[in-house]
Amino acid sequence: MLELRNIRKVFGDCVANDDVSLVVHKGTIHAIVGENGAGKSTAMKIVYGFYSPDGGEILLDGKPVTIRNPHDAIALGIGMVHQHFLLVDTMTVAENIILGAETGSAVNLDLDEANLKIRELSDSLRLNIDPKAVIEDLSVGQQQKVELLKALYRDADLLILDEPTAVLTPQEVSEFFTILRKMKEQGKTIVIITHKLDEVLAISDEVTVMRDGKTVGNVKTSETDAQALARMIVGRDVLLRVEKPDANPGDRLLEVKGLTVKGRHGIAVNNVSFQVREGEIVGIAGIEGNGQTELIETIAGLIPVESGAVLIDGNDVTRSGVKKLKELRVAHIPEDRHKRGLLLNSSLKENSILGVHYRPPVAVSGFLNDRSIEKRVTGILKDFDVRPPRPELAARSLSGGNQQKLIIGREFELDPKLLLVSQPTRGVDIGAIEFIHRAIIELRDKGRAILLVSAELEEVTALADRLLVIREGTIVGEVDPKTATVEEIGLLMTGGK
Ligand SMILES: Nc1ncnc2c1ncn2[C@@H]1O[C@H](COP(=O)(O)OP(=O)(O)OP(=O)(O)O)[C@@H](O)[C@H]1O
Ligand SMILES: [Mg+2]
């Protein structure tokens, strides 16, 4: 159905796509995998007319096509769901879907008609989306479905999904895959970019591997496995399991006492108490939206406390704010890198000093010390393998996974006593996941305290020394991650529902 021949795309002096060739067969689910920055999103954005290629050709049903913009792509039956959603929060589902449907005629702006068609589409795939719901009231998983509906509304036959599962909970992922299979039955063709090899194996018919802007392999999914794929992606063997020695915890470093926090929809964190000691990783497991985000952001000084107290190293920091926390060497890797983690239009260099820009060695007597900043940024880019390692580049032009590596590098650079970390490996490639897991464990073994939230149950159980389960803002249990079963944790997370 879709064929790319020798596609090339250059941004300035960065070759994003060097030589991309692949064939996607009609009615199949085709996975594209590869390291962060390999050029996956770029190649697919070219198919969607977001960028025009500097070389090569695109064929659709055997015929060469020119796709100058998304409008052309939509007319050819191509739809795309981007790595970062493009929905307007304050508008309804239907409004978002018809917005920019790019037909322009008044008829198509008829909301009632749109509501009807969206409801039909939603029903045919059992998406359970109300066209009149406002986006900001929907969960991330539901927003994902809205993005799908948006493409289907425009009659897409070929759907390109760029890391659609990165922000979904495990339950949402399996639901999402059921939808994809149904779409395939309806004759749609799907291209899916993902870093999760178990997903590739579960959902795809064929896999294409990209490295350094080139397609380097193509296999039938039934003829490969996770180890083999990992080797094709990274070019070496990858440890897909976390291996760590037992923790050797010391003094209490973080103490949370009866913490209550208000969220957007009432009480988000309800009378939570726990401790994290030096040299241990405490994990928090829970279905997203159960208060874990608010909990960690409160400890990080970003959300005000309603009642209760937070103590770090014996200091009461309940109302201290971010600056004081940074001075106590509290690092925070936030879950939403665009909202909280980076200044997208600023350079990597500027981003590398966020939070420490006012104090030595970055600033001396009120002046920024360029040499020390330069040293800091090159160190981070090198140690955390941020590609391309160019300090002057805007954070926006890094690929998703490389943005995440930059944030992690910056926070580790604080040599934190306490690391607060949410979704550390979201959107990160398997080689980098191995690296980040090791870095977190090394930090622990240096005697540092780590509080970890991850929607990936596998990740929290593998990394945490102690695992707390949160539900509806309350810690409902503590389990030993070494012995607890997924069912047991799942039961606590859902309250047996
Ligand atoms: N608009 C842009 N301007 C400059 N460079 C860009 C731009 N978009 C992408 N790049 C560069 O092109 C390369 C490929 O990026 P791309 O986003 O396609 O990678 P990816 O395979 O999707 O990675 P990830 O898995 O991290 O999402 C990267 O080195 C990136 O920094
Ligand atoms: Mg990408």
Image (cartoon, grey):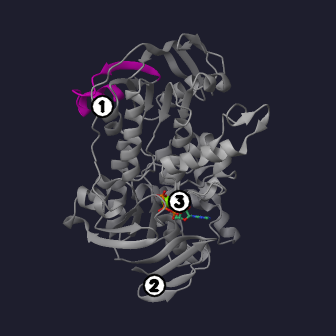
Q: Nearer the viewer, residue 47 or 482?
A: 482
Q: Is residue 82 left or right of residue 454?
A: right
State the image coordinates of residue 379 (x, y, percent, origin top left): 55, 46
Q: Which mark is residue 72?
A: none
In the image, is residue 12 above or below residue 407?
below
* Magenta region: 473-497
In three-dimensional space, the C-alpha distance between marks 1 and 3, rounded to whole angstroms, equals 30 Å
Report helix, strand or loop for mark 2.
strand
- Give yes or no for contact between labels 3 and 2 (Cβ–Cβ under 8 Å): no
Of the image marks 1 and 3, the number of the one nearer the N terminus = 3
Q: Residue furthest right?
A: 366
State the image coordinates of residue 492 (x, y, percent, origin top left): 32, 25
| Residue 496 in magenta stretch | yes
The quarter holding residue 451 reads top left
Specify the amino acid type for callout 2.
Leu
Residue at the spot x=55%, y=59% of the render?
Answer: 388
Of the image marks 3 and 2, the number of the one nearer the N terminus = 2
Q: Is residue 343 visible?
A: no
Of the image marks 2 and 1, the number of the one nearer the N terminus = 2
The answer to whether the beta carbon of the residue marked 1 is less than 8 Å from any atom of ligand 1 is no
Q: Nearer the viewer, residue 175 or 488?
A: 488
| Residue 395 in magenta stretch | no
The answer to whether the beta carbon of the residue marked 2 is less than 8 Å from any atom of ligand 1 is no
Q: Dot 3: within a 10 Å radius of its alpha carbon, few (fewer than 14), some, or many (20 or more) residues? A: some
Report helix, strand or loop for mark 3.
loop
Can you identify the residue that label 3 sits on? Answer: 82
Residue at the spot x=24%, y=61% of the render?
Answer: 228
Can you identify the residue that label 1 sits on? Answer: 490
